[in-house]
Image (cartoon, grey):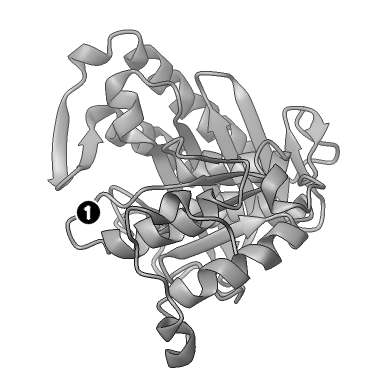
Amino acid sequence: MPSPNLHPMINVAIKAARAAGAIINRAALDVEAVRISQKQVNDFVTEVDHASEAVIIETLLTAYPGHGIHAEESGREHGARDSEFVWIIDPLDGTTNFIHGFPVYCVSIALAVKGKIEQAVIYDPSRNDLFTATRGRGAYMNDRRLRVSKRIRMNECLISTGFPFRQDDNFGNYLAMMGEVMQRAAGLRRPGAAALDLAYVAAGFTDAFFETGLQPWDVAAGSLLVTEAGGLVGNFTGEADFLEQKECLAGNPKVYGQLVTILGKYSKFASAADKAARRPFTPDQAVAPAV
């Protein structure tokens, strides 16, 4: 049992996530046989994404036929259109990792009620790790209550991120952000599955996470895990209403505050004065002393 007094809706989401995980694990045994197509440059989808999404939607709508669905591959095609209850689904976050047999990927399921995330499940099928959260009841990994890390010194912190991979991403901006963070932190990691990155912040495995270009299904479940574990989630300027903004920063409260100071000027929501303070990336920046 992931946590005491489980909400009935989260039990259904766990059932859906495990069913999807079984499909993913079976396919992972012969990943070379998996059919792959490309949505856009460097953005892949497989038959496993589609099969995983289908079983999740079937499980959720069998239990709650009046609920809405917002899923990565099928959008809002399924479920009720006008429900106050909307399931936000990423059936396989980390598809590029999965295609290569790199075992960092997960299933992410969240329930929004009147636009607010109330339930969250992230399931890592390769490790059989189940992360759950219900608003107001805490976050759990398997049967362990989660708390964000207590580190406050940036030079002791392990921070995760995601690299830009689309042609219209601002690579220069990202290199500058990475340059500023790398010279201050103990380490910077790019595992490749944003939902799992957020779960790891909640678990205290990393101290913070930041990435641009993310969609609601990437961050909906993970954001509740982080806040229920005592962390903060927002955009780069520290505003909590980030879900649709394609900009996500999460961390324990002290590190989150420090990263807002560093990354805020790179936000698309930064003031003109803050944007003027951006440091353009230069090759020597990565070895420049921290200021």
Q: Is residue 51 visible?
A: no
Q: Does 209 appear above or below 83?
A: above
Q: Name the residue rendered at 47%, 91% in the picture.
A: 273
- Of the 4 image quadrants, the one containing the N terminus is top right
150 on left or right of 57: right
What crowding class fits label 1: few (fewer than 14 Cα within 10 Å), some (14-19), or many (20 or more)? few
- Of the 4 image quadrants, the one containing the C terminus is bottom right
Q: Residue furthest bottom?
A: 272
85 and 248: which is toward the camera: 248
228 on left or right of 221: right
Q: Position of residue 35 (x, y in %)?
A: 16, 24
Q: Name the residue rendered at 75%, 31% in the picture.
A: 2
276 and 13: which is toward the camera: 276
Q: Does 188 appear above or below 79?
A: above
Q: Name the residue rendered at 21%, 19% in the picture.
A: 34
Q: Which amino acid type corresponds to the residue marked 1 in the rendered image?
A: Arg
13 on left or right of 146: left
33 and 82: which is toward the camera: 33
Q: Position of residue 185 (x, y in %)?
A: 61, 48
Residue 100 quadrant: top left
Q: Which residue is mark 1?
A: 166
Disc 1 is placed on an element classified as loop
Q: Position of residue 178 (x, y in %)?
A: 44, 54
163 and 123: which is toward the camera: 163
Q: Does 39 appear above or below 84?
A: above
Q: Is residue 239 visible?
A: yes
Residue 169 quadrant: bottom left
